């Protein structure tokens, strides 16, 4: 896949070499997983089970679609030496903006501003560290913003129930295996 010129031009100016900023953006970038945990804990603490179900099921559906796109398009990363998984679209950008969009209406102005700033730092970090092209981050972000509004609620609940039933069946199988192991 040919990399668009605007991606190459922007990358030439954005990729950084400051060791302290590298550490900062690496920490910010990987804290996206803490962002997911924050959202889940927030919904559970507020006893907002509807929000919890919609967030988790839509996140799982979205990550499945993003992963499918990554491996279907198979665009190499700017510095392929660092990672072998495809670059387009950015999964971190998707999760960051998905979580921001899912939480945005639940908070007041100051907290919203903090969430926006944090999400934007994650996006900038992916570029600064040189692990994504700008279009990877833009499309991942765009999908993260529209995805929570795109999936019908009935479908989200169906997926969540499907996953729940799957996990219950696995638990039953594991219990049977455990009982067989202890009998013999």
Image: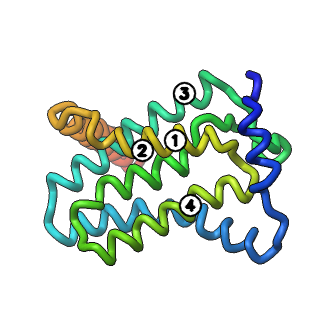
Q: Are marks 1 and 2 in contact (CB under 8 Å)?
A: yes
- The disc, 4 or 1, on the residue closer to the chain's N-terminal end is 4
Residue identified by numbered label 4: 122
Q: Secondary structure at mark 1?
A: helix
User: Residue 10: x and y, percent?
Assistant: 74, 46
How packed mark 4 is, by other alpha carbons closer than 10 Å (few <14, some 14-19, many 20 or more), is many
Residue 140 seen anywhere in this rendered image of the structure: yes
Q: Alpha-carbon distance for marks 2 and 4? A: 13 Å
Tell me the mark number nearer the camera, choosing from 1 and 3. 1
Q: Secondary structure at mark 4?
A: helix
User: Residue 62: x and y, percent?
Assistant: 40, 38
Residue drawn at point x = 67 percent, y = 38 percent: 87
User: Residue 129: x and y, percent?
Assistant: 74, 58
Q: Secondary structure at mark 3?
A: helix
Q: Quadrant of residue 158?
A: top left
Numbered circle sitting on residue 144? 2
Residue identified by numbered label 3: 69
Q: Alpha-carbon distance for marks 4 and 3? A: 21 Å
User: Residue 149: x and y, percent?
Assistant: 26, 40
Q: Are marks 4 and 3 in contact (CB under 8 Å)?
A: no
How packed mark 2 is, by other alpha carbons closer than 10 Å (few <14, some 14-19, many 20 or more), is many
């Amino acid at each position: 896949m040919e990399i668009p010129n605007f991606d190459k031009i922007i990358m030439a100016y954005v990729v950084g070499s400051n060791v302290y900023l590298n550490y900062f953006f690496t920490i910010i970038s990987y804290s996206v997983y803490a962002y997911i945990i924050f959202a889940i804990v927030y919904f559970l603490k507020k006893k907002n089970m509807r929000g919890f179900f919609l967030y988790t099921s839509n996140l799982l559906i979205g990550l499945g679609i993003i992963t499918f796109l990554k491996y279907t398009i198979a665009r190499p990363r700017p510095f392929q030496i660092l990672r072998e998984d495809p670059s387009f679209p950015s999964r971190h950008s998707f999760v960051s903006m998905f979580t921001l969009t899912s939480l945005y209406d639940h908070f007041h102005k100051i907290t919203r501003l903090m969430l926006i700033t944090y999400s934007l730092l994650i996006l900038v970090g992916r570029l600064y560290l040189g692990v994504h092209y700008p279009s990877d981050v833009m499309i991942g972000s765009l999908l993260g913003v529209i995805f929570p509004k795109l999936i019908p609620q009935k479908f989200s609940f169906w997926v969540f129930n499907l996953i729940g039933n799957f996990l219950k069946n696995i638990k039953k199988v594991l219990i049977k295996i455990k009982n067989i192991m202890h009998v013999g």
